[in-house]
Amino acid sequence: MKSGALLSVLAALLFSTATVASDAADRYAKLASLPLEGGYPTEETSRTLDEELYFQRAVQSYLWALPAMNMYAMKTGLGDQFGYGYNVVSVYEKRLKPNTVITTPNSDVIYALNWADLSKTGPLVIEVPAGLQGLMDDMWHRPLEGPVIEGDRHFLGDLGLPGPDRGKGGKYLLVPADMEPGPEADDYFVFRSRTNSVFIFLRGFFTSVDDLSPGVDAIEAVKIYPLQGDRKDMKFVHASDIASNALFTHDFSYFESLHKFIQEERIDAVDPYMHGMLAALGIRKGFEFKPSARHRELLDQAANTAWRMAKNIAANFDQQPKALWWEDRQWVAHAHTNLDDFMHTLIDEEFRDRKTGYADVDAKAHMYVNHYSISTGMMSSVVGLGAKYGNAYKDSNGEFLRGEKHYTITFPPDAPAALFWSLTLYDAETASGVDAEGQIYPSLNSMNDLVKNEDGSVTFYIGPEKPAGARNFLKTVPGRGWFSLFRFYGPTQKFFDRQYKPGDFVPAKH
C-alpha cells in the first residue's frame, strides 16, 4: 500500500473512532440534560428516562444472572438432547469435541454431566468409585456446602480426589439447604444445596489417549439414587459424536430462559435487590412474563449489549488489578491472586472478595461468560489437589489472538502437574473448542506423543496451516479470534513456589 493511501486509511479509522466516542459522549450529555419543567419531567423526558432505566436494568440483570443462565443453558441444552432425570448422565466417552458447544470444556478427560432435582427426589445419594474427580454446584453456580473435616477444612462442592473421600470412593448425600437429615446421614458425606436442581459434574482420567476405557469405566460405575423410594436404572448416554448446543443466548430469548428458570426454582434469599430488578423487568416468580413489543426490543438490545460488555471484560482481563499469574506474561487467573503468593486467592468460590465479602463483578462476568463450574478444588491451595488454570487472550505483544496468524509457545520442562497438563484453544465468540477442519480435538496434553526440545521443553505451533516439519500443532480458523487455557491437574509444589512459568504466544515472523 502506498504511503498516501495508508495515511488515508489511518485518518478514516481515527475519524471513525472519534465519531463513536463523540456520539457516546453526546448520548450521556443528552440524558443528563433532559428537560424538567418546574421540577417535573416533560412527556418526552419521561418516555426517554423510562426506556433508559428499563434498558439499564436489563443490562445489569443479564450480567448478574450469567452464572445461572450459563448453568440453565447447559441443563436444558443437554437435557433436550440426551434426556432429563437424576439417573441420566451425558458421558463424553471419546472425549469432548468441538461439536459440543459449551464454554471452555476440557477435551483431555472423560466428562460426565448430570442434573438432579431435589424437589422431586428428596435427599439424593451419589456413590462415587475410587479415582474420580468431580464437583457439585447449585443452579447459581455456587458450590454445595459440604462437611468440615480435619479440623478446619471445609469442603465446598468437591467430590472424589479433591473431596472428602480423597479419591478412595465414598457415599455422598445431597439435601436441600434448609433440611436437617436424620441419623442415617452419618454414613454419608452430606452436602447442602440452596436450589432445587443440582449440577453433578464428573471427570474420569486415563493414562493413554489410545485407551480411554479407565475414565469411562470409572464414570459409569457411579450410582445416583434417592435416599428413599424406588431407584431408576442408571442411563449413561454416550455424547461425544452427537452435536449439541449448551450455550446461553445473547438476545431476547435469554430473558425468556431467565423467566423459566425463576419459575422452576425456589425463591433465592441472596441478593433481593437484584431479584427486585428482575421484577421491574417483569420477571417474577408466580407471574407471567408479558413484555410489550417495545420492551421486547429493549431486552433484545440489552442482552446483546451486556454480552458484549462481558466479552470485553474477559478479553481485557489482563488489565484488571492482580489478574495476571506473572507480570511479564499474558496469562490471567480466574481468581485474583497476588503475584508473590500463589497459595491464596483473593476471592472465594462465589467470587466474593475474601476481606469485604463484596462480589467481584468483573471477575464473575469473566468467569461465567467464558467458563463454567466452580469448587474449592478449582481454587485449591493444597498441593496435589484440584487443578490450576490460566487464560491467554493476547499474544506476547499484547495483541488479541487471531485465527489467521501463526504463533509458537513454549512450556519449560517438567510441568508442575502430578496427573497431566494440557493446552486448549477456544473460539473467542462461543468459548467452545476451536472447530478447525480435520482437527478432532482443540487441545494437546502431556499424554499425547509430544515432541520435546533438547532441554525437555515443549514448543507448540498454532495457526491456520501446519508449518513444514512442525510437530505439536494446533489448527485455528482464519477470521475467528481464539483464546487458550493451560491446565495443570494435580498442581505440584513447583507451581505454588512460582518456580514454573509458561511462555507466551509469540507471533511468527514473516
Image (cartoon, rainbow, N blue to C red):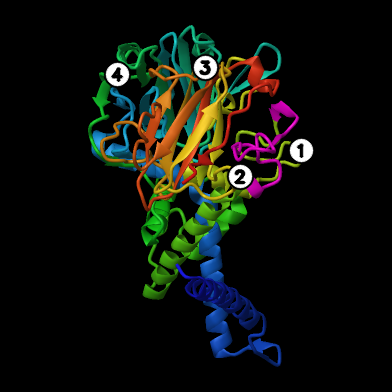
Q: Is residue 122 visible?
A: no
**Residue drawn at point x = 38 percent, y = 66 percent:** 290
Q: CA distance from mark 2 to mark 3?
A: 39 Å
Give the residue displayed 57% in from the left and 36% down from the top.
504
Whether residue 19 is visible, yes or no, is: yes
Local crowd size for mark 4, using a 10 Å CA cut-off: few (<14), some (14–19), many (≥20): few
Residue 428 in picture, x, y percent from top left? 44, 48
Q: CA distance from mark 3 to mark 1?
A: 46 Å
Residue on which the image places disc 2: 363
User: How far across and down, in percent of the image, does residue 447 sit?
Assistant: 41, 16
Q: Which residue is mark 3?
A: 454
Q: Separation of disc 2 and disc 4 at Cα?
A: 41 Å
Answer whether labels 2 and 3 touch (C-beta < 8 Å). no
Helix, strand or loop at mark 1: loop
Q: Amino acid at mark 4?
A: Arg
Asked whether disc 3 touches disc 1, contact meaning CB atoms under 8 Å apart, the reply is no
The label on residue 231 is: 4
Where are the magenta residues, as a range? Answer: 318-344
Label 2 vs 3, first from the N-terminus: 2
| Vertical relation: 43 (above or below) 364 | below
314 to the left or right of 298: right
Q: Earlier in the sequence, mark 3 or mark 1?
A: 1
| Residue lying at the far front of the rendered structure | 2
Rendered view: 402 above or below 185: below
- Image coordinates of residue 444 in percent, x first then y, are 41, 26
Amino acid type, label 2: Ala
Depth check, front residue: 283 or 140: 140
Residue nearest the viewer, comparing 100 with 64: 100
